[in-house]
Amino acid sequence: MHWTEALKLALQSLWANKLRTVLTLLGVVIGVAAVIAVVTLVNGANAYVDAKLNRYGSDVFTVSKMPNLITSFAEYTRYQKRKNLLLDDFNLVQDNCKRCVMVGAGQGSNVGVKYGTDSVTDVSLRAWTAAMPELNNLNIIEGRSFTPTEVENGAHVAIVGTDIQENLLKGEDPVGKELRVDGVVYTVIGLGEKQGKTLGSSQDLYVSVPITAYQRTYGTQKTVTIYVKAPGTGAALEDTGAEVRTIIRSARHDRLGEPDSFTLDLNNTFLSLFKTVTNLFGAIAIPVAAISLVVGGIVIMNIMLVSVTERTREIGVRKALGARRRDVLLQFVIESGLMAAAGGVIGVLFGIGVGFAISAVAGFPMGIAWWSVFVGLFVATAVGIFFGVYPARKAAMLDPITALRSDM
């Protein structure tokens, strides 16, 4: 019997038992979908973090009171005891760092903003030095950015995000408008380019003001984050970081041999750590999800055994008409493999759909790994064939006379 005829018979058998076929596929569908979804989300998360770090650039690093990643409450408590980084520390780095291409500082809080009788809440108030819009790769699409003189004098000027323009200013040209930020009046001088969402939270609901104006309202003792642009990546980044570390340790009188009283975060170090964590998550989650494939294969084997029992007379008739053992074996192996392959295709589509849904809600990009699609389809089909061999062999070994006497 040619394999095309076996394929036709397998399709007819599966179509004749549609509900049972669909229920049998569920294990394979869930397993493949879980694997595809996990790989997609891990790739998307890595791409997202890489893109967000590259917003500053791979040659930009930060100096802050606390690290970006804290793994325990004990660490948080220890870091909280550190002295705050102040604007004086920023000025010290800016004035003394020879390798630094650009230095900026920022801090902020969430505030309410009013325009006329309208208002919005939970607005991100970003207090920046003059270099921060450029360090942040913020494109000003209308108006202009801060000048060093405005920052030095604490001028009440502001750059706003597109959410402020759309929701508070009702789409009007924001330049020249006066906003009340926590009751303090600021004149809008620029509109930032739309940045979209991050993990479901809009990045365009913000007002950026000179850090000196911010500190006149909220005080000068709150900690700041210092941003430093190095002349390049690799050794240039490491050397610039070492120079900034020396400057700040000297100013804060950190003793020789003791750890830093601040955190210097190189983006490549953080990105490497994040990718290690997400890849470890994937390495654990994928085998767990793959268990569903094994369960699906066992279900396929069980259903195929039932099918062999139900079709004993059919097998006997076919053998009596001249079908060989390998013909019967081929028919049932193709049937189980076809069932698993169909489950793999559905699982891939479902897994990608889950990835798209989570990506839309969380706000980070999709990261479909095509190798995982092909591997998922191959493994699903292989599982179906593997677990289908025993039922197929049992069918092939049936004695035709005994099969014809069956009441099934």
Image: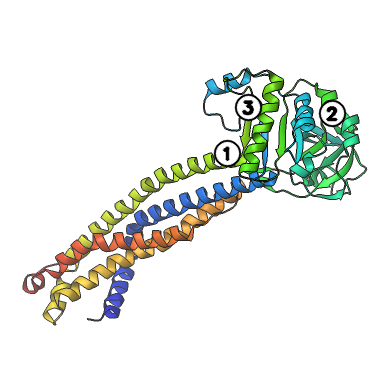
Per the rendering, the mark at residue 212 is 2
> Mark 2: which amino acid?
Thr
> In which quarter of the view is residue 2 placed?
bottom left
Residue 117 seen by the camera: no
Q: Residues within 10 Å of mark 2 (few under 14, many from 20)?
A: many
Q: Quadrant of the C terminus?
A: bottom left
Mark nearer the N terminus (2 vs 3): 3
From the viewer's perspective, is residue 67 above or below residue 4?
Answer: above
- The picture places residue 285, in percent across and down from the top left corner, at 41, 45
Q: Is residue 142 left or right of residue 253?
A: right
Mark nearer the N terminus (1 vs 3): 3
Q: Residues within 10 Å of mark 1 (few under 14, many from 20)?
A: some
Per the rendering, the mark at residue 323 is none
In the rendered image, which residue does mark 3 sit on?
A: 66
CB of mark 1 within 8 Å of CB of mark 3? no
Instruction: Determine the CA span between mark 1 and mark 3.
Output: 13 Å
> Mark 3: which amino acid?
Met
- The picture places residue 148, in percent across and down from the top left corner, at 87, 37
In the rendered image, which residue does mark 1 sit on?
A: 270
Q: Residue at x 67, y 35 (%)?
A: 62
Q: Is residue 202 left or right of residue 402?
A: right
Q: Is residue 115 left or right of residue 125?
A: right
